[in-house]
Amino acid sequence: MDRAWWKESVVYQIYPRSFNDSNADGIGDIPGITQKLDHLQDLGIDVIWLSPVYQSPNDDNGYDISNYRAIMDEFGTMADFDEMLEEAHKRDIRIMMDLVVNHTSDEHAWFVESREAKDSSKRDYYIWRPGKGGEAPNNWGSFFGGSAWEYDDASDEYYLHLFSKKQPDLNWEHPELRRDVYEMMNFWLNKGVNGFRMDVVNFISKDQNFPDGEMTGTGYGDGNPYFVNGPRIHEYMHEMNQEVLSKADTITVGEMPNVGVEQAKLYTGSEREELNMVFHFEHVDVGSGEYGKWSPQPWKLTDLKTIVTTWQEGLEEKGWNSLYWSNHDQPRAISRFGNDSEAFRVISGKMLATCLHMLKGTPYIYQGEEIGMTNIAFESIEEYRDIESLNAYKDFTSRGTMSGDEVMHAIHERGRDNARTPVQWSAEDHAGFTTGEPWIAVNPNYKQINAEAVLADPDSVYHYYKRLIKLRKQNPVIVYGKYQLLLEQDEQIYAFTRELDGERLLVLCNFSQEEPAFALPEGIDLTGSEVLISNYEVGGEAGLPALKLRPYEARVYRLN
Ligand code: TEU
Ligand code: CA
């Protein structure tokens, strides 16, 4: 197994708008991040994945970029960025930028020029097609509702936007566009950034016939089969690797909705020279109904274990996994996979952390997870800011497919703003995030749940994360050990072993609030074993054939 620093690292994701506001305008910013680097160093993380900080009109909170080489005014200046990078490096923290190159903002100079005229030199930087019989070129729906095509009067053509109208898709077929993207990546690498998280990068190659998709419940066709892992995707990824990534010592992860493990082997296999890791969505999509995440259903632990195990085994020796429970598009981990009630919030947060950090791969912590933050349930749709949730509310209620209450329920469970309320730093006003008016309201539970409180409490989620991160540094088996699932059929306990050079760990996680019994499988005996970490007091089990796990209990043994 090839060793690599990015395999041994723990990554922490910052969503800058919601992280820390340094100048009282209610918006998190780059100097605000610099102020908190000591917090991150204390936690022990190695890499920051920074969600977009580039110039943007903020139709999709920075995922709509109007200038790749400038910093968003609200976030500060390039000098602020350089200072943050330097301060991070001083603390041995690397910075991974968000690379959003499936689309730009419609306010990007390329698009402005592209739109000007059919014969503009930038026309082919985007995807323009004539209509069909007075309608869009095909029936694809956009991820944020409505058609994926927008009509442009001046040229009587349509442009493709898989996301919002203000996010036109780039045309990767065009060699000059690719060259410009690679140059821009080199601009950031030359500044000293350490890698890229690549937004929906498995969408960049489209089937050039743009066929209609199968109709879905939204009234539009499903274009996924024609742009997910499209015809030239591996050619582009390899080219990017050769032109840019291979020339620097980088960490890379491609965000890839609808990617499966077979494709992931092609993206992450080291001999393929494409990427280090991908983010797949199979585990965070469990419990999705008729309208996907907008019809949330109960989920089964066996489904989750099957998915995780497929990825653990599938990429063994053939690639590398990224490990995450949450990010800026997902609900809070504790609310989604644990239990956010007063009684079980902390204990289940520790259990989830144990499970994730003991799997094989590079763990990602989403801001606030280390504090034990939970979902938000605003009562009125007016309090929400996320374009996806706002559009979904409008679409479902206007089409009459769901009542307002039903959509609100779905937003409470799965909406993206769950992850985007400000980080709760203290019990002061607005959780110490800002002294102004925050751009989105703070979760009212901030008086109990905040960084100051968890730092002061040695038994907190925060200190538990610190211990997990430290263990990873001390035990190569946690990074490189082979994974094996135990108790496949169990609906409450997730149990597995990790093994490296004869050293073996046993990981036990109870995902329920009950007290299931765990019968030790053949060949596993706790006599002489050592507890590496656990979220309850443990002892006295040596030699027993079975143990009972307490609600949301997690234990890691080093077996004799
Ligand atoms: O997300 C990709 C994506 O597919 C999202 O639509 C996400 O899966 C969805 O919110 C879950 O229902 C990336 C970014 O992470 C997201 O913030 C952006 O809005 C999106 O791309 C467009 O850039
Ligand atoms: Ca600010």
Image: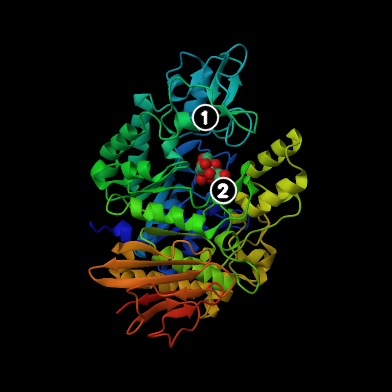
- Label 2 to label 1: alpha-carbon separation: 35 Å
Read off the residue under disc 2. 74
What quarter of the picture does the C terminus occupy? bottom left
| Crowd rating for badge 1 (residues with CA inside 10 Å; few <14, some 14–19, many 20+) | many
132 lies above or below 492: above
Is 460 or 499 nearer to us in this picture?
499
210 lies above or below 395: above
User: How far from the left and from the top, in percent, is residue 399?
Assistant: 74, 33
**Most extreme residue toward the top, as rendered?**
133
Which callout, 2 or 1, points at the residue further toward the start of the chain?
Answer: 2
Q: Quadrant of ligand 2?
A: bottom right
Q: Residue at x 48, y 69 (%)?
A: 509
Task: State yes or no: discs 2 and 1 in contact (Cβ < 8 Å).
Answer: no
Is label 2 within 8 A of ligand 2 (CB to nearest ligand atom)?
yes
Could you say which disc has been placed on residue 223 in the image? 1
User: How far from the left and from the top, in percent, is residue 209?
Assistant: 45, 19
Q: Residue at x 47, y 27 (%)?
A: 110
Could you say which disc has been placed on residue 498 in the image? none
User: How far from the left and from the top, in percent, is residue 408?
Assistant: 72, 49
Is 246 or 416 nearer to us in this picture?
416
Q: Quadrant of residue 182?
A: top left
What quarter of the picture does the N terminus occupy? bottom left
386 lies above or below 3: above
| Residue 324 visible in the current orientation | no
Which amino acid lies under the numbered mark 2 shown in the image of this protein? Glu
| Element carrying mark 2 | helix
| Crowd rating for badge 2 (residues with CA inside 10 Å; few <14, some 14–19, many 20+) | some
106 lies above or below 536: above
